[in-house]
Every structure is written in structure tokens, then in C-alpha cells.
Image (spheres, rainbow, N blue to C red):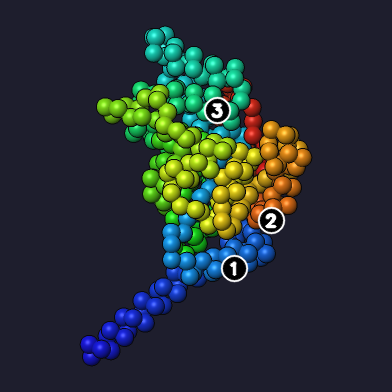
Amino acid sequence: MKRILTVIALVLAGAAWVDAQTYRRINGWPQEVNSRIESFLNSTLVTTTRKVAVFDCDGTVFGQAPHYLADEALYRYADEAYKSRTDKAAKEKLAILQAMVRNGDNVGKRYVEDRIHFLAGLSPEEIELMGADCYHRAYRGKMYPEMKEFIANLKAYGFEVWILTASPELLYQKFVSEELGIPVTQVVGAKCVIARGRTTGEIIPPIPQDDGKATAIETFIKAKPLIVGGNSRGDMDMINESCGLRMVVNPDDETVRGPEDGPMSGYTVKSYWEKEGALIVKCNDVTDPSVHFHTADWKIRKNKENPK
């Protein structure tokens, strides 16, 4: 009887393993996309080393129209916590945002660093709750269902799923980890030194932005990824770190990139990745007219919509 029970247990364990490694079709993406993903994932079944997938955040796993969540969270917080105050601390925080507005380049290095400077002095928990509150108030429902299904497949195939974002790490970790079912330590963004329970303005490099995303993979993840996905020119270096599948979500096909964009010069983001053989997918990203975006009040430029 003991031998029979052992055999039954082994059979059930084998069945569970097979089920865990079975690809589940991603609704909303065409069959050719599903077939390519399934074929690649099945090719990794014999892999014995770490299986790592890395994705950009805004515009790749959830929507960024009309504004980046990192901006909306900060401008919303400023309106609610500082605008009615006249004390020195409030004036200093508002001055940081006013400088960011004058800068105007909300994907530039200085702007990205100033987000950290604005948050400095708050506790990690306060920043996590700020990001989660902004997500639930203005971005709930904008997490792409196709990407959530894709990530569920990756986890079933034994992948570690990592998110890299140029936005403040603490601002994104709580809601992203909860929505995607991944550890908070696998949501990596712009980091700062934390001392005596409070964040500081001291930034820990590399910031996962442009070529910094590629070095962040080496620095923080410490593995060559089998899958990398992004959506913009800023993700080019990171995507090229993939030694397997490269994915691009809603790539721009209007702006022809210039010499400053290196190998992408002369191409749109979409045409460049088509040439490189990347997997290009569409996800619905449109503005919810019922949401009041504080970012718009501060006159920060809008991101392009991508209706599916």
C-alpha cells in the first residue's frame, strides 16, 4: 500500500508540474503573438539557470495616458499637502516642482532626480501609500490585462519577473507588486538613501533610465535576462540586454529618431524594432475623462494615447 501511495503521489506531482508548464493563451493578442510566446517559453523548459524577465513600467505594463503616474502622484500631493501652506518647508517643496515645470523634460535626468528631491524627508511608508493612493484614484484599470496574463505565464514557467522604472522606487513598489503578484524587491526604480526612517535626497546610482536601465540589470538583478520588454526610445539599451525574446508595447511610429539616438537614428521606435525582429504588441491606453489629473493643471505635457 505504501508503494502504491508513493506512485500516486509521484503521478500527481508530475501532473502538477506539467500543468504549471502549460501555456495559457493571452486574450487580446493575436494567435501569431501567442504562438511566438508559447514557442519561446517552451524552449526555456530545459534551462537550469535563473530565468529572468525584465519589463519597463509606465507604458509597458500599465497605461501612461494622459500622464505618468509618478508625475500625477507628486503634483496631486503638492496640491493637497503644500499649496495652502506658507511655511518654509512647503515653499521649498513647491519650488522644486516649479523648477521641474520650467524644465519641462519629464524624461530627462534632472527632472527624474528632482522627483527624489521632492519626496525627500518623507518616510518610505508615506511614499508607498502616496503611490498606491494615486494608482487607485487615477490609474485603477490601466494595468494592461494582456501583460498581467503574460506575466502569469512567465511565473508558471519558472521566471523571475522584474520591473525597472526611472520613477522613484518607493512610489511604485507597493501597487506594482500587489497588481502583478511579484516581490517588492523585484520592482526597481530610482533609489535614495534612507536614514533614521526617512528618505533623503541622496540618490543611489544607477538610475534605471536610458542606458542606466541596462546597467541596473547588471547591478541589481545580476543575471542576463531571457525576456526584456519596453515601450519607448528610453528602453532601447535595456531591451538589447535580452539574450532571448525582445518585446515592445505600443511603440511610436511617428517620430523619426535623430543621431543622438544611436542605432535608432533614422527610424521610428516601431520601425527600428521591426527591423530587429522584436515582438511588437498592442495594449489599450486611453485617457479616462472622469479622472481629474492634477498634472494637467501644472501644464505638464501629455503622453500620447494608444487606443487598441
- Residue at 56%, 56% in the rendered image: 243
Residue 277: mark:
2
| Residue contact between numbered discs 1 and 3, judged by CB atoms under 8 Å | no
Amino acid under label 1?
A: Ser
Give x and y (percent) for residue 114.
Answer: 49, 23
Residue type at mark 2? Gly
Query: Above or below — where is 82 with respect to 193?
Result: above
- Report the Cα–Cα distance between label 2 and label 1: 15 Å
Numbered circle sitting on residue 62 = none
Q: Mark 1 or 3 closer to N-term?
A: 1
Q: Residue at x 44, y 69 (%)?
A: 20
Q: Are marks 3 and 2 in contact (CB under 8 Å)?
A: no
Q: Amino acid at mark 3?
A: Lys
Label 1 crowd bin: few (<14), some (14–19), many (20+), radius 10 Å: few
Which residue is nearer to you in this view: 82 or 44? 44
Name the element at disc 2.
Answer: loop
Residue 138 or 168: which is nearer the viewer?
168
On residue 39, which mark appears?
A: 1
Taking the image as shown, residue 171 lies to the left or right of residue 294, namely left
Q: Which residue is mark 3?
A: 109
Q: Quadrant of residue 66?
A: top right
What residue do we see at 59% from left, 68% from top? 39
